[in-house]
Image (cartoon, grey):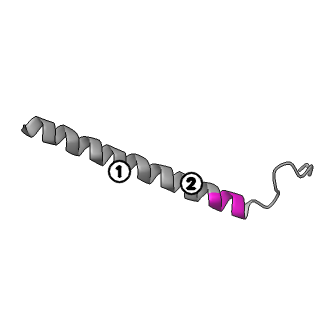
Amino acid sequence: MKKFLLIALAAVAGLFVYRQIQADRAEQDLWTEATDSVPAGSGVHS
């Protein structure tokens, strides 16, 4: 029974870490989009 609880706890912790990483990536994507000086597809070449 202890092994099952340990595995379940590890799975929940792994899910929490995965969701936190996904949220951080989404926030970073928003910041990148908001602070990008040249919109993609604008036809401006540097």
Coordinates of residue 31 in the picture (x, y in percent): 64, 61
What is the three-letter code of the residue carrying label 1?
Phe
Coordinates of residue 23 in the picture (x, y in percent): 49, 55
Judge left or right: residue 17 versus residue 23: left
Q: Nearer the viewer, residue 28 or 9?
A: 9
User: Which residue is drawn at the image coordinates 92% and 52% (left, top)?
Assistant: 44
* Inter-mark Cα distance, 1 to 2: 15 Å
Say the numbered circle drawn on residue 25. none
Judge left or right: residue 20 versus residue 39: left
Give the residue pinned by disc 1: 16
Please provide the residue range marked out in magenta. Answer: 30-34
Q: Nearer the viewer, residue 44 or 42?
A: 42
**For numbered disc 1, what is the local secondary structure?**
helix
Magenta span main SS? helix
User: Which residue is drawn at the image coordinates 86% and 48% (left, top)?
Assistant: 41
User: Which residue is drawn at the image coordinates 14% and 42% (left, top)?
Assistant: 5
Total numbered badges shown on the rendered structure? 2
Q: Residue 38 occupies which quadrant of the picture?
A: bottom right
Give the residue pinned by disc 2: 26
